[in-house]
C-alpha cells in the first residue's frame, strides 16, 4: 500500500539512480526494474550556497522562495491525487546543507513567511520543503544534520496545523556504536580520557561532506551525543578529560574508491579502577545506505502512525533513529540507545493501551509494581 515519490536535482529514474549509486546488486534491482523506472523525480528546490559540492540540471526556478514553496505544494497535491493516496509523509534524505545557526527569520512563522517572500538568504531548501509539507498537512522528518523543521517558526506551524515532525540526522553507523558503548562506560564507571573517530567514504554523501560548511553540520550532531551520555558535570573525575580541547575528535574523509561502503574507525582511551589505562578500538566496515534505508521506512510508517494517533509537533519518542533528536525547548535529548528504545516501545504500548514496561523486576517474584 506504499507509493514512493520524491525530488532530485538529477532527472534519473529510481532504477537509473540505483544503478549509478552501485549500492544494490543487479540481482536485487532487476526483478523490480519496471517499478523503479516508474519512479521519476520531480524537479528539486536547490541552492548551491547550501550544498557547494553538487549541482544538477533538474531544478525549479522562481522569483521568490515563497513561489518555490508553492511549486512544492503543487507537486504534493498532484502526487496525492494521481496516486489516489489517503495520507502522505515526507522524509528529507537530501545532502547535508552547510551549518548555520537559526537566524531572526526562523524565530516566528510570520517572520519566516516574510523571509520566503523576500528571499531571505538564511532560509535553506530543506526548510522550504518542510514548510510546503506542513502547509499541506504532511508530517515531516529530517534525516540530515542541518537545521530544517527544528526552528521556532516551523515548530509553531506544526503545532498550529496539528502535524507530527521529527529529526534530525539518521543514526546509522559510527554514532550508533557510540550510543551503545558510551552508556556501557557510564554504567560501569569506566573513565574516558579521549575518543578519536574518523570515517572514510566515497559516495555522493562523502563528496558533499568534503566541504567544511557541510561537514560542520555533521560534526555537531556526531560530536554532541557524548555530551549527554558522558556528562562531565555529573562525573567530573571520569569524563572531564574527554571534554578538553582535542580529546574528542570527529573526522570524515572523502575517499572515492570506498564508494558507499563506509569505514569508521574509533580509538577510545579508557581508565578503570585505580586509574589503570585501557583501550578499545572499533573498525566498522559498514554500508551507509543499507543501514539508512530501513530507518527511512520505519520513520515513514511510525510518523504516519503518530498522525493517525492525533499526535502533533515534535515526536521525541522517535529519537531512537536520530543522532540529534528534536526535543521541546529547554530539554536535553537522551542519546543512549537503550533509553531511546525503551521510550519508543513504551510510546507504542501507550498508544495501544498496554501496560508500560517499568523494569522493576519485583513483579516476577509475586510483588506488586
Image (cartoon, grey):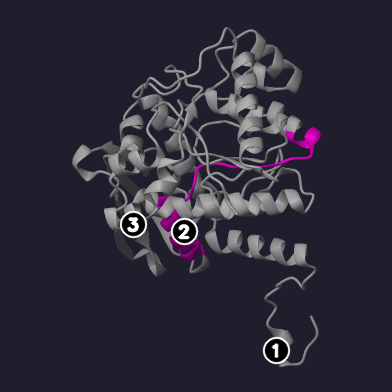
How far apart are labels 3 and 2 at the CA level?
36 Å
Left-right relation of 301 to 221: right
Looking at the image, is mark 3 or mark 1 earlier in the sequence? 3
Residue identifier under label 2 = 182
Residue at 35% x, 30% y: name it. 208
Q: Nearer the viewer, residue 183 or 352?
A: 352
Label 1 vs label 2, nearer the camera: 1
Question: Residue 3 in the image: x percent, y percent?
Answer: 56, 47
Label 3 vs label 2, nearer the camera: 3
Q: Secondary structure at mark 2?
A: helix
Disc number for residue 28: 3
Residue identifier under label 1 = 364
Q: Secondary structure at mark 3?
A: helix
Q: Magenta span covers which residues?
A: 158-186
Would you say residue 175 sits in the magenta stretch? yes
How far apart are labels 1 and 2 at the CA level?
30 Å
Amino acid at each position: 500500500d506504499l507509493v514512493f515519490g520524491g525530488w532530485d536535482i538529477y532527472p534519473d529514474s529510481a532504477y537509473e539512480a540505483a544503478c549509478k549509486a552501485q549500492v544494490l546488486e543487479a540481482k536485487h534491482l532487476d526483478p523490480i526494474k519496471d517499478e523503479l523506472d516508474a519512479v521519476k523525480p520531480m524537479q528539486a528546490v536547490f541552492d548551491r550556497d547550501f550544498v557547494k559540492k553538487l549541482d544538477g540540471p533538474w531544478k525549479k526556478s522562481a522569483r521568490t522562495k515563497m513561489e518555490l514553496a508553492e511549486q512544492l505544494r503543487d507537486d504534493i497535491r498532484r502526487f496525492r491525487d494521481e496516486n489516489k493516496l489517503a495520507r502522505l509523509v515526507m522524509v528529507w534524505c537530501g545532502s547535508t546543507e552547510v551549518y548555520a545557526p537559526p537566524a531572526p527569520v526562523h524565530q516566528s512563522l510570520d517572520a519566516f513567511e516574510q523571509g520566503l517572500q523576500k528571499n531571505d538568504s538564511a532560509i535553506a531548501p530543506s526548510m522550504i520543503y518542510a514548510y510546503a509539507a506542513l502547509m499541506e498537512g504532511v508530517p515531516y522528518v529530517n534525516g540530515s544534520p542541518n537545521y530544517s523543521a527544528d526552528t521556532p517558526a516551523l515548530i509553531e506551524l506544526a503545532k498550529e496545523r496539528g502535524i507530527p515532525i521529527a529529526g534530525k540526522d539518521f543514526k546509522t553507523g559510527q554514532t550508533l556504536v557510540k550510543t551503545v558503548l558510551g552508556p556501557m562506560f557510564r554504567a560501569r564507571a569506566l573513565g574516558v580520557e579521549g575518543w578519536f573517530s574518523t570515517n572514510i567514504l566515497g559516495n555522493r554523501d562523502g563528496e558533499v561532506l568534503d566541504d567544511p560548511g557541510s561537514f560542520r553540520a555533521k560534526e555537531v550532531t556526531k560530536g554532541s551525543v557524548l555530551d549527554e551520555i558522558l556528562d562531565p558535570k555529573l562525573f567530573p573525575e571520569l569524563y572531564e578529560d574527554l571534554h578538553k580541547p582535542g580529546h574528542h575528535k570527529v573526522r570524515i574523509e572523502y575517499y572515492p574508491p570506498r564508494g558507499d561502503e563506509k569505514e569508521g574507525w574509533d580509538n577510545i582511551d579508557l581508565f578503570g579502577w585505580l586509574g589503570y589505562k585501557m583501550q578499545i578500538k572499533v573498525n566498522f566496515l559498514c554500508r551507509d545506505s543499507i543501514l539508512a534505508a530501513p530507518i527511512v521506512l520505519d520513520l515513514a510508517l511510525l510518523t504516519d502512525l503518530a498522525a493517525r494517533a492525533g499526535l502533533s509537533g515534535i515526536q521525541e519518542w522517535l529519537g531512537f533513529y536520530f543522532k540529534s533528536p528534536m526535543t521541546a525547548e529547554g530539554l536535553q535529548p537522551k542519546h543512549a540507545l537503550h533509553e531511546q528504545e525503551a521510550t519508543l516501545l513504551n510510546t507504542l504500548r501507550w498508544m495501544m493501551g498496554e501496560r508500560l514496561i517499568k523494569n522493576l523486576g519485583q513483579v516476577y517474584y509475586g510483588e506488586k509494581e
